[in-house]
């Protein structure tokens, strides 16, 4: 099983980024997928999730209205479109399959700073 994130970068406040995660090694189309983030000294925080089949989404209150999670089952990928980025969004972002006890990527760094 592999989850590989990409797209992290340094961006100015108010800017946008799109993170991608490519998945292999299990049946992606039937897996609930998530994005988490973590800052040093704190636990991982669920940012957004997208359900298999229904495509239903959920978001942390801090990102609702600014971030959008999506999935492409044909390509076994998920995405996180991040708009209106704030310094508080600075973190390592992790792709996750099947929740906390599932599978994780290695993370991609997002830094929001002027």
Image: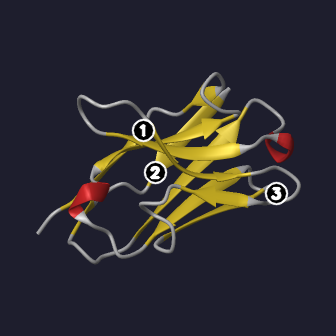
Residue at the disc numbered 2: 6
Comes first in the chain, label 1 or label 3: 3
Say which residue appears at 53% left-offset and 61% top-offset: 80
Residue at the disc numbered 3: 74
Q: For residue 111, which quarter of the picture?
A: bottom left
Residue 22 versus residue 55 in the image, above or below: above
Comes first in the chain, label 2 or label 1: 2
SS label for mark 3: loop
Q: For residue 1, which quarter of the picture?
A: top right
Query: How far across and down, in percent of the image, does residue 46 sit?
Result: 51, 44
Mark 2 to mark 3 CA distance (whole Å)? 18 Å
Q: For residue 41, which quarter of the picture?
A: top left
> Would residue 29 appear left or right of 60 to someone viewing this image?
right
SS label for mark 1: loop
SS label for mark 2: strand
Q: Alpha-carbon neighbours of circle 3 within 10 Å: few (<14), some, or many (≥20)?
A: few
> Would residue 13 appear left or right of 43 to someone viewing this image?
left
Residue 38 versus residue 109 in the image, above or below: above
Residue 80 versus residue 107 in the image, above or below: below
Residue 107, disc: 1
């Amino acid at each position: 099983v592999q989850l590989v994130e990409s797209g992290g970068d340094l961006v100015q406040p108010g800017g946008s980024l799109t993170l991608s995660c490519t998945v292999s090694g299990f049946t992606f189309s039937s897996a609930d997928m998530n994005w988490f983030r973590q800052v040093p000294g704190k636990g991982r925080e669920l940012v957004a999730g997208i359900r298999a089949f229904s495509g239903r989404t959920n978001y942390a209150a801090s990102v609702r209205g600014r971030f959008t999670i999506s999935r492409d089952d044909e390509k076994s990928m998920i995405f996180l479109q991040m708009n209106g980025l704030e310094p508080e969004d600075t973190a390592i972002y992790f792709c996750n399959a099947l929740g906390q006890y599932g599978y994780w990527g290695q993370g991609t760094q997002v830094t929001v700073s002027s």
